Image (cartoon, helix red, strand yellow):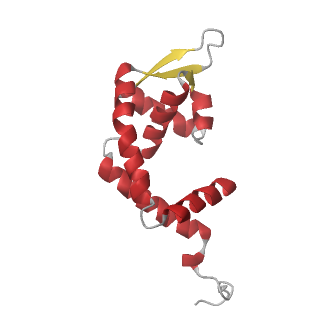
Amino acid sequence: MSPGSVLPPAGYHLQEQIGFILRKAHQRHVAIFAAHIGDLTPPQFAALAKLHDVGETSQNQLGALIAMDAATVKGVIDRLHARGLVQLAKHEADKRRLMVRLTDEGQRVVQELVPLAQTITEETLSPLSARDAAALLELLAKIS
């Protein structure tokens, strides 16, 4: 180590830190997702699935519902729109608001992919017992 460098605190191990562990779990999930659904990203699927649940909503509200900032959700929606999966329209009363809804093709895609999404969740959690998987989801919900 060079002079003046600081050593990590005694007992600090990167592999035991929450951020490191969450990143590895996320990488595992994304790899499983890509193996099952190669032509959409998890954020794109999340947008489609939430639109299926709530129907037409504003782009900003959709972002809030799927935990994405405005810039990220805009990019996701733009890509889904380019693929013909969502339709965009100005809000009738507030022309600054962009409304988003699934197209018929978007509806079809969501209905086709939901069973795969359930399989992806099961595969992601497969190293855990059912009880541990439920506990993990409950605990993660508390810190998110």
123 left or right, relative to 74: left
Q: Quadrant of residue 122?
A: bottom left
Q: Position of residue 58 (x, y in %)?
A: 59, 24
Q: Position of residue 130 (x, y in %)?
A: 50, 61
Q: Is residue 84 visible?
A: no
Q: Is residue 41 above or below residue 75?
A: below
In the picture, the quarter occupied by the N terminus is bottom right
Q: Quadrant of residue 48?
A: top left
The residue at the point 48 percent across, 22 percent down is 101
**How many circles with numbers are drawn on the protein?**
0
The residue at the point 56 percent across, 37 percent down is 71
Residue 98 or residue 127, whichever sits in front: 127
20 left or right, relative to 127: right
Q: Quadrant of residue 136?
A: bottom right
The residue at the point 54 percent across, 65 percent down is 132
Q: Is residue 29 above or below residue 64?
A: below
Q: Position of residue 95 (x, y in %)?
A: 61, 13
Residue 82 or residue 42, whichever sits in front: 42
The residue at the point 68 percent across, 55 percent down is 142
Q: Is residue 118 visible?
A: yes
Q: Is residue 85 above or below residue 26?
A: above
Residue 104 or residue 1, whichever sits in front: 104
